[in-house]
Amino acid sequence: MTRFTRRQALTLLGGSAVAAACAGQTPGPVSPEGVAGTDAFVPLHELAQAKGLRFGTAMSAGQLDDLRYLEIVRRECGVLVAENAHKLYTILPQPDAWNFAPGDALADFAQDNGLGMRGHTLIWSHPRWLPDWLNETEFATAGEAEAFLDSYIGRVAGRYSPFIYSWDAINEAVDPATGELRETPFTRAMGPEAIDYAFFAAKEAAPGATLAYNDYMSWEGGHETHRTGVLRLLERLISNGAPIDALGIQSHSNEDMPNEYTPEKQRAWRAFVDEVVGMGLDIYLTEFDVNDTDLGPDIEMRDRLIASYTRDYLDLMLSYPQTKELLAWGMVDKHSWLQGFMPREDDVEKRPTLYDSNYQAKPMREAVAAALRAAPDRA
């Protein structure tokens, strides 16, 4: 017998009412050849480009062997970002053990298919995602840490310059529990200026690329301290003259479910985004997907809730002319990282992306298309 948490049970009880409220607003599953409710299929990257936006997806090197996945990427996307292949733990898992093969394969695919490419990420400023050997490194001086950053960032960003047009120079530097910077080997040696230094090193290595700080603060309850810490970091970077162009808002929603995107939370979230654009920064939506861990198992109900949330969230975010990019964190459900993160208690497959595991477009895909059609033009 399937067992549900209290939260899942409540969601199931309310699901029919919510689905009924959404009925007529979001179409059912559709095929790649045509989109329900539209005159003809238009690729998402074309809808985005018409409004001055970029649309694309994350991808792993392993997916280069999935021909059906590649068909979707070629059709729908104008931009590619490596899911993990350009991260430090992949490129330099051991001292002097450089591994560019996965990242090069993805860059080659992007170039061969006329896709742009973003870089993610030069420094993941989180000890959990740095290799053990680097976490155990104690730089004797700030100069030694600077030399490492110069060498590593120069070699990585320089390798793909000018093809990679934008980099997440720093990823997830703020501890969400405290709002303070996480400690890394670099901050131990250099203090908070390690973050600034990475931006300057990235600009030196890839002068034509835009640079972003990327993090997962969101509209969800409990993210208030995280948002405050990110604002404080952005203010300090700008005041120090760091070459930062944008905030990358990952746009995962994990702790709160899509039907918890309440007007009160939207107001608080809009206030945060207002602060960011008020600093003169652009916005990149860098890792969009929707977690359904605590929704009931009914597929139609989940798809409708996710599509409704997708349209509401993107309508808000795309209303800002400073929002320049929308990247999905994967395009097909079975490939999503969320299948293994915060797993469902009922073992039902999650449905967090635009296409299901049979490579069929879902209502979420049309919700993205509708939001792009409705978005104001960018300057």
Image: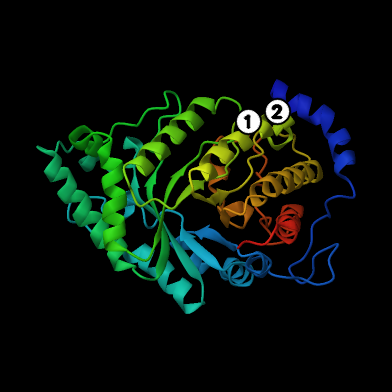
Q: Position of residue 92 (x, y in %)?
A: 26, 53
Local crowd at mark 1 within 10 Å, few (<14), some, or many (≥20)?
some
Mark 1 to mark 2 CA distance (whole Å):
7 Å
Depth order, front residue of 4/206: 206
Depth order, front residue of 176/97: 176
Where's the N terminus, which quadrant? top right
Amino acid type of the residue that numbered disc 2 sits on in the rendered structure: Glu
Residue 104 in the image: above or below residue 60:
below
Quadrant location of residue 130?
A: top left
From the viewer's perspective, is 244 left or right of 136? right
Please report the residue visible at 42 percent of the width from the left and 60 percent of the height from the top: 166
Residue carrying label 2: 264
Where's the C terminus, which quadrant? bottom right
Q: Residue furthest top?
A: 6
Q: Give me the disc on residue 268.
A: 1
Quadrant location of residue 7?
A: top right
**In contact (CB < 8 Å): disc 1 and disc 2:** yes
Q: Position of residue 120 (x, y in %)?
A: 41, 54
Local crowd at mark 2 within 10 Å, few (<14), some, or many (≥20)?
few
Q: Is residue 3 visible?
A: no
Q: Position of residue 285 (x, y in %)?
A: 56, 50
From the viewer's perspective, is 186 left or right of 22? left
Amino acid type of the residue that numbered disc 1 sits on in the rendered structure: Ala
Please report the residue visible at 61 percent of the width from the left and 47 percent of the height from the top: 289
Q: Position of residue 23 (x, y in %)?
A: 89, 46
Depth order, front residue of 24/245: 245
